[in-house]
Every structure is written in C-alpha cells, then in structure tokens.
C-alpha cells in the first residue's frame, strides 16, 4: 500500500506596500491639483502655484483668499488620490485589522507625497520658463515712470531744457532707471527701510536733470516714491509670510486627507 502525502503549497508573501496603487493615486491627485489651480486662476484667484517664482498677489487679503483656495484644492485632490490608492492596493489576508489600518493610512500619505514631489518638480520646471518671461518685465516700471516723468512745461522753458539736454547727451535714461531700480530694490534687505542721505541726494539730482523739476521739487518726488517703495516692500514681506503659512497648512491638510481617505478606500476594497 502506497501512502499519499499531501503537501500544501505555501502562498507567496504579499508585499506590505502596493506601489502601483500609490503611483496611481499620486498621479490622480497631481492631475486634479493642476486642474483645480487652473480653475482658480480662471475665476480670479491669484495663487497659480505655490512653487511659482512670481505672483500677482499684492495684498494680505488676496493672499488669504488664495491660500484658502490652495488648502481646499490640496484637501480635495489628496483625498481622491488617497482613496484610489487604498482602493487599488492588494488584499492582505490574515493580517490584523490594526496593521491593515496602518498600511492603508501609509498608502494614502505615500500617494500624497508622490503627488507633492512630482508636482513640485513639474511646476518648478514650468516656473523656470515663466520666470524667464517675468524676469524681462520690469515690475517697478510704473514707479520709475512716475519718478522720471518729465515736467514738459519746464523742459520747454529754458533752464530745465538746457540742463536736461546736457545731462541726457552724456548718459542713457535706461542707465539712470536701472540705478534707481537697484536703489529701491534693496528695501527689506538686512532691515533697510530707507535710502541713505547720499543716495537720496544723488537720486534727486538725477531726477531734476532728467525731468526739468527744481531741486526742491525733485527731492519731494523722490521722497514720495521712496515711501511707496517702502510700503510695497513691507506688503510683499507680509504677503510672503501669509502664503508660506497657507502653503504649509495646505500640505499638512492634504496629508491628513489622503491618509483618512485611503483607510476608507481600503475598507471598501476588503468589503468591511
């Protein structure tokens, strides 16, 4: 009599991480993020990308509104990506429920991280192109226009015309505009909030020679533009702080939403 021995084939272990599900969820989250940000730009929100090198936001109120929209976008996109990652992951047989819950949450967070890193790389590349175009645009153009706006009445009346003509003959206006732009661009650096006395006097002489204004009037114009530049620099600093806060908040909210949604997707996957 021959004894029959039945050997049970051991099932191959199932990996704890389902990378295809994570990548799928991350791609979906990134795509939805781009869609919602484009929609926000279309309906008037200024925050196009948290990684963009330039922004049209000029007030803290606009930064708050744009930041809230950015947070809502992060929650919606991350939740959908996390749910898909949890729903598409493999089934883990004979794994304690607590461990399944942890793995599902980790899948959601990993999908969020994948979407964030991929989105940052893509948008940073796009921002390089946008930044090249933005760099050619003089953001202080209107301020410099006001600073060097000529007094045509004075320029056609003798003294101003001769002074401006002699000065302009030896120096390009674009050079003077660039000098003035660099002076005001230093506001906010190392706590600097005003021009030095020498810079202020030099700039007033330059404006007087270029515009036909008297020295006193040129000094008043320089003082006015200096105040505007100081306010603009302070506003830009506060706007930057607001946007940084909302960027961090939106990323944290996105991670939480992705983790929670992934647990729901995993529960639906297992029929729980």
Image (tube, rainbow, N blue to C red):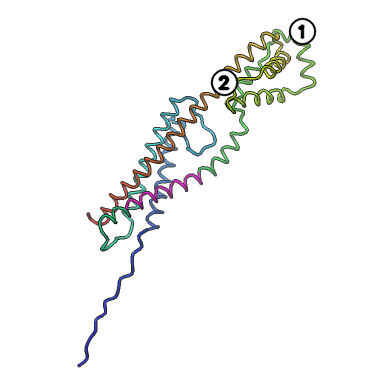
Mark 2 is surrounded, within 10 Å at the Cα level, by few (under 14), some (14 to 19) or many (20 or more) other residues, namely many
Name which quarter of the figure residue 93 lies in. Answer: bottom left
Q: As displayed, is residue 7 above or below residue 13? A: below
Could you say where residue 167 lies in the image, as x and y percent from the top left? 77, 17
Circle count: 2
Mark 2 element type = helix
Residue 230: assigned label: 2
Mark 1 is surrounded, within 10 Å at the Cα level, by few (under 14), some (14 to 19) or many (20 or more) other residues, namely some
The rendered magenta stretch, by its main secondary structure, is classed as: helix
Residue denoted by label 1: 159
Is 254 or 39 nearer to us in this picture? 254
The C terminus lies in which quarter of the figure? Answer: bottom left
Frontmost of labels 2 and 1 is 2
**For this view, does 214 lie left or right of residue 228?**
right
Q: As displayed, is residue 51 above or below residue 96? A: above
Q: Residues under labels 2 and 1: Cα distance?
A: 33 Å
Q: Measuring 26% from the left and 59% from the top, which residue is drawn there?
A: 96
The N terminus lies in which quarter of the figure? Answer: bottom left
**For this view, does 33 lie left or right of residue 153?**
left
**For this view, does 63 lie left or right of residue 132?**
left
Could you say where residue 80 lies in the image, as x and y percent from the top left? 34, 46
Could you say where residue 190 lies in the image, as x and y percent from the top left? 59, 28
Name which quarter of the figure residue 88 lies in. Answer: bottom left
Mark 1 element type = helix
Q: Measuring 23% from the left and 56% from the top, which residue is drawn there?
A: 271
Is 134 or 204 nearer to us in this picture? 204
Q: Earlier in the sequence, mark 2 or mark 1?
A: 1
Residue 112 drawn in magenta:
yes
Q: Are marks 2 and 1 in contact (CB under 8 Å)?
A: no
The residue segment tinted magenta is 103-122
**For this view, does 146 lie left or right of residue 71?**
right
Q: As displayed, is residue 252 above or below residue 107? A: above
């Amino acid at each position: 009599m021959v004894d029959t021995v039945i050997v049970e084939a051991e099932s191959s272990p199932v990996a704890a991480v389902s990378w295809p599900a994570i990548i799928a969820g991350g791609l979906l989250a990134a795509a939805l993020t781009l869609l919602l940000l484009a929609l926000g730009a279309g309906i008037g929100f200024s925050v196009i990308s948290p990684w963009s090198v330039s922004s049209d936001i000029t007030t803290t109120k606009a930064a708050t509104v744009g930041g809230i929209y950015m947070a809502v976008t992060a929650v919606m996109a991350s939740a959908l990506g996390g749910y898909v990652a949890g729903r598409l992951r493999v089934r883990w047989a004979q794994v304690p429920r607590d461990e399944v819950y942890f793995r599902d949450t980790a899948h959601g967070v990993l999908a969020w991280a994948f979407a964030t890193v991929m989105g940052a790389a893509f948008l940073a590349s796009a921002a390089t192109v946008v930044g090249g175009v933005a760099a050619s645009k003089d953001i202080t153009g209107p301020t410099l226009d006001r600073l060097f706006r000529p007094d045509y009445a004075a320029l056609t009346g003798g003294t101003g015309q001769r002074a401006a003509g002699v000065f302009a003959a030896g120096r390009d206006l674009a050079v003077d505009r660039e000098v003035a732009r660099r002076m005001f661009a230093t506001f906010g650096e190392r706590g600097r909030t005003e021009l030095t006395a020498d810079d202020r006097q030099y700039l007033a002489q330059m404006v007087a020679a270029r515009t036909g204004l008297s020295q006193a009037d040129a000094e008043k114009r320089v003082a006015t533009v200096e105040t505007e530049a100081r306010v603009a620099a302070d506003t830009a600093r506060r706007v930057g702080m607001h946007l940084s806060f909302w960027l961090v908040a939106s990323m944290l909210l996105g991670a939480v939403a992705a983790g929670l949604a992934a647990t729901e997707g995993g529960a639906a996957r297992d029929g729980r």
